[in-house]
Amino acid sequence: MKGLTLALLALGTPASAGPVFLDRSAALPVTHVYSGGWEHFVGGGVAILDCNGDGRPDFAAAGGAGPTHLFVNRTPGPGAALAFEAAELSVPTGVTGLWPLDIDGDGTLDLAVLRAGPNLLLRGDGQCGFAKADWGFAGGDGWSTAFSATWEPGRSLPTLAIGNYVDRADPNGPFGTCDGNELHRAEAGRYGAPLPLRPGFCALSMLISDWQRTGRPELRISNDRHYYVSGGYEQMWRLDPLAERGPDEGWRRVSLWGMGIASADLDGNGFPEVMLTSMGDQLLQFNEAGVLRDAPYAQGSYAQRPYLGDDGRPSTGWHAEFGDVDNDGRLDLFIAKGNVDQMPSNAMRDPNNLLMQQPDGTFHEAGDAAGIASGARSRGAGLADFDGDGRLDLVVVNRRAALELWQNATPGTGHWLGVELRRDPPNTRAVGAWIELRAGGLSQTREVTVGGGHGGGQAGPLHFGLGAAETALLRVLWPGAGWSDWQEVAADGVVTLRP
C-alpha cells in the first residue's frame, strides 16, 4: 500500500466495560503547578507532542507565575506504568498556554507560547530542545489566552490567530475593557505587523475550522462575557477576505462565559459538532450541513452542576476534548472543571467530567466510576496514548494544585487505529486535512486542526476507536487537493499516510 506505514501493533478486543483510570501523578519527576494571581485565573494549558521522534507523546505544561515544564516520555512499552523525565524548557514565566505545530516546515514540531507578556515562537531541534526563532514574529505585550493556526495557499509559514483577554493597560478595567485580537500572516518567509481583529470580547479559545465543508476555513472565537459585560458574543471570522460573519450571513450570535472549544463529528454526517465550555451550561451544538443547533437537554452534555457532593451551584468548564476512551467507535467527552478562584456564585468542589457516549448518541457521566473525579481547580488537559497500548490516557493541569496524570486501564476495550498525516513543506502535518474512516458499519470523519481547547492542544496521531472491527477503510481529503483512494488497513496500530 503506497504511502502507508504500520507501527505499534497491539491487540484489542470489543469494548465491554466502563472506563478505569489509574493515578500516575506520583511518578512525575517534578511537581507542576499552574500558579499566579489574577492574570492566571485563566489559562494553564498543556501541549502534547512527540518532541524527539521516538513515537511516544511528550508534553509541556504552562506554569503561569511558576516555571513551565517539559515532560519527556520514558514509558518502556504498551501497558507499562507511565514514566516521564523532566527536561528544561527555557521560557520566561507568565506562560498561559502552548500549542505544537511545525512552523518552518522542517518536519520537526515547534511551539507557539502565549503569555501575560510578549508571546514567543520556539523552534524545535528534534531532541526535545526549543529555542526562540527569528521569523519576524511580533510577540506584543498583551494578556494572550487563545490560539489557532492554519496554512493558507501560497504562504510558507502558517497564519496565526492570537486571542487577547482583558487590556491590562486600561485604567478603567477590568470590566468592559476587553483587548483586541490579532492575525499574523507571513510574506516571503517572515511575519509582518499583525492584522487587528476587532472588536474583541475577551477571547479564551479559538479554532480555525472548515466547519461548513466549503474548503474555506473560518476562525471561531469563544469569549468570556464576565469581562465584556454586554454587547459581546461568540464570533466567526472569514479569513479570505478577512471579515467578521454577521447574523445576516447565517451566524446566530450566542453569548456565554466562553472558556474552551472542542470540535468533532459526533453523528457521522461529515460536519463537525462544536462543544463550548462555560459557567453553568456547557453548550454542545450539532452541525447540520453548516447550520448549528443547540443540543437538547436530554443529550446529557450540559454538565451544568457537580455530579458529586451537595454543592448545587453551577459548574465552571474549561478545557473540553473529544476522544474514544473505550474504543467502541463512539467519541466520548472530557471536560476540565474548576472554580475561577473563589467565585461564590459557582461550585467550589467541581470534579472533571468524563461523558461516555451511548449507542443512542446521548452521554452518561463516568468520571467518578473511572477514578478521575478530582476536586482540584482544573484548567487545561489532554487525551493521548502515552504508553502505546491503544487506550487514551489523560493529563490535567490544575491551578494552585499539582498536575495530574491518569493512565487508561479500561478492560475489554475495542480495536483502535492511530492516523498520522505527512506531506511536503510547508504544511508538513497536513493541517486542514479531513480523514474519513469506515469500520464496523460506522463512518467517522476528523479534521486536522491547530487550536481550540483551553490553553493548549496536541500534534500527533488522530485516534479512532473501531469496536469489534479488525480492519478499517481510510481516505484523506488533502488541503488544496482532492480525496485520496480508499485504503484498507489493519487495526491496532498507528499508520502514516502521505499523498
Image (cartoon, rainbow, N blue to C red):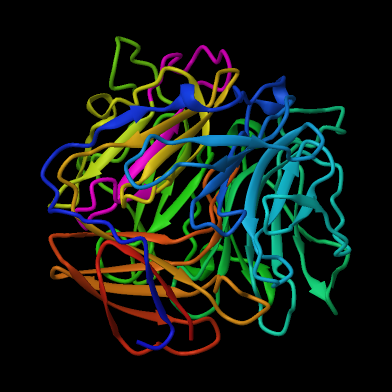
Exactly how many numbered labels are in the figure?
0
Q: Residue furthest front?
A: 76
| Vertical placement of residue 1 versus 142, above or below | below
Whole-percent x, y for residue 195 in the image: 80, 63
Q: Is residue 416 left or right of residue 446?
A: left
Return the residue nearer the eye: 484 or 479.
Answer: 484
Q: Position of residue 351 (x, y in %)?
A: 38, 23
Is residue 46 visible in the rendered structure shown here? Answer: no
Residue in the foreground of this view, choosing between 74 and 42: 74
Per the image, is 10 magenta?
A: no
In this image, 471 relative to 7: left or right?
Answer: left
Inspect this view and state whether residue 170 appears: yes
Residue 50 position by quadrant: bottom right
Where is 80 relative to 371, above or below?
A: below
Q: Residue at x 12, y 53 (%)?
A: 14
Q: Which residues are magenta?
A: 322-351
Is residue 347 a member of the stretch shown in magenta?
yes
Residue 17: image location, x then y, percent: 13, 39
